[in-house]
């Protein structure tokens, strides 16, 4: 009752119950590590693909 009185007897639910969702914590180091690993995979795959293109007499990818 004290809390209701402090809120000028306003019974709006939002005054008493939070509907906000907690933000998801992002591990920036883990994201960075994953991006670095993906970049390395892309580079290796591009090099392998370029070898096939060269064998076929085609221009390699940049």
Image (tube, rainbow, N blue to C red):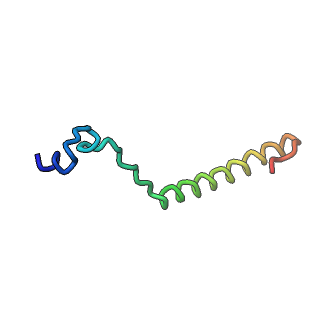
Q: Is residue 25 found left or right of 46 in the rendered image? A: left
Which residue does the image show at 59% across and 51% down from the upper left? Answer: 38
Which residue does the image show at 21% across and 46% down from the upper left? Answer: 8
**Relative to 25, is 15 above or below?**
above
**Relative to 58, is 47 above or below?**
below
Residue 21 locus on image (x, y percent)? 35, 44
Residue 4 locus on image (x, y percent)? 17, 45
Which one is nearer the viewer's eye here, 13 or 46? 13
Which one is nearer the viewer's eye here, 55 or 59? 59
> What is the count of numbered marks?
0
Residue 48 locus on image (x, y percent)? 72, 48
Q: Is residue 58 found left or right of 5 in the rendered image? A: right
- Image-quadrant location for residue 56: top right
Name of the residue lying farthest toward the left: 1
Residue 25 locus on image (x, y percent)? 40, 54
Which residue does the image show at 22% across and 48% down from the upper left? Answer: 7
Name of the residue lying farthest toward the bottom: 29
- Image-quadrant location for residue 16: top left
Quadrant of image for the N terminus: top left
Q: Is residue 46 found left or right of 37 in the rendered image? A: right
């Amino acid at each position: 009752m004290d809390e209701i009185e402090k809120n000028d007897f306003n019974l709006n639910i939002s005054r008493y119950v939070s509907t906000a969702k907690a933000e998801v914590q992002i591990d920036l180091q883990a994201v960075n590590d994953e991006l670095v690993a993906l970049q390395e995979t892309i580079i290796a795959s591009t090099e392998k693909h370029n070898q096939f293109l060269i064998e076929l007499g085609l221009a390699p990818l940049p």
